[in-house]
Amino acid sequence: MAWNLDSDRPIYTQIVEKLQMQIVSGFYKPGEKLPSVRELACAACVNPNTMQKAFTELERSELILTQRTSGRFVTEDIDMIKQVQTTLAEEQIKIFMDKMRGLGFNREEIVTLLELLIKGDSK
Amino acid sequence: MSSYLLEASGLTKQFGNETIAVNQLNLEVGPGKIIGLLGPNGSGKTTLIKLINGLLTPSSGSVLVKGHAPDIESKKTIAYLPERTYLQNHMKVSELVDFFADFYEDFSKERAYMMLHSLDIKSTAKLSTLSKGTKEKVQLILVMSRDADLYILDEPIAGVDPAARDYILKTILNNYNENATIILSTHLISDIENILDEVIFIKNGSILLHTTVEDIREQQGKSVDSYFREVFAC
């Protein structure tokens, strides 16, 4: 199945986000070999050059490493993966907070509601 | 020697005294790209495609494929899917595969049978017994089974259902080599824009815009499909 991509944002940035997500969530494990550009392009139904551009971006941030002969691998630096995970979480929380403020909640009310809901969730 | 796979300069095609289908068109296309040729009805897409394939001769200006004007040699490097079928209805699918294999040195029967199999098309079937959509699939498979430098597909997915469309796009992605360029004309922009590198907007026989999909998304903040609707709003 093709990946769900928004139509109004650059495709490669969405692929970068998706691959980051798959790495921090452990879908691709530290040190694991990634599928080839063409395989992933085909799975996502995107242009191979776009997939390549996303890979280049992830290589620049050193989240994935290229070994010239054997392919691309997820970094084994677990601290770095953790750091990316935290950054992504912070972004999501910021979006959440902005939306809640848009609904008229203040900081304390948000925390109270969140605790209440989490309790309900764990029962 | 220019590095462009396809070059048109001042390309013009006039029919009779009134209709100028392609008008002073300039275009440069490099290797290794998937390019959407997009424009409203009657904008000159098919005429341009026929000029590139040597099926029409220019009224003025020139078109070069790998530095040469269209001739027998250029047909060896271009795989062309016309908007209308030219295959003989009485032939079986397997006979068509043999026909293409005889005709084109770069044709891979193995690839053709693999794609026919994945799309569940029986090679013993006569073309006349197949539905319109299935005929289109057969024709596209034959074209994509060639190992060409330039694939020109005129409306390749118009007649097939959405599920087969996805398969066909994957087929295109899987089967072209990295140095080949694919030019495809279509109205179904939203279905294909994710697989495109570049888009060419054509209007009244001239290039209105030639840019990358990502540039449109970055600069306009919208999809190629929405941008097309805006640019060509009636």
Image (cartoon, coloured by chain):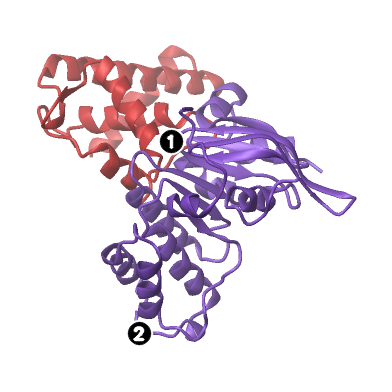
**Secondary structure under the numbered disc 1 in the rendered image:** loop
Say which residue appears at 58% left-offset and 57% top-offset: B155
Say which residue appears at 40% left-offset and 84% top-offset: B125
Q: Is residue B31 left or right of residue B200?
A: left
Seen from the viewer's position, the closer of residues B64 and B205 is B64
Seen from the viewer's position, the closer of residues B85 and A43 is B85
Q: Is residue B21 left or right of residue A103?
A: right
Say which residue appears at 60% left-offset and 53% top-offset: B54
Amino acid type at circle 2 is: Thr
Q: Nearer the viewer, mark 2 or mark 1?
A: 1
Image spot of residue B61 (x, y percent): 70, 37
Residue assigned mark 2: B124
Amino acid type at circle 1 is: Pro
- CA separation, marks 2 and 1? 37 Å
**Secondary structure under the numbered disc 2 in the rendered image:** loop
Q: State whether residue B128 appears in this view.
A: yes
Residue assigned mark 1: B31
Image quarter hosting the C terminus of chain B = top right
Chain holding disc 2: B
Chain painted purple = B
Chain painted red = A
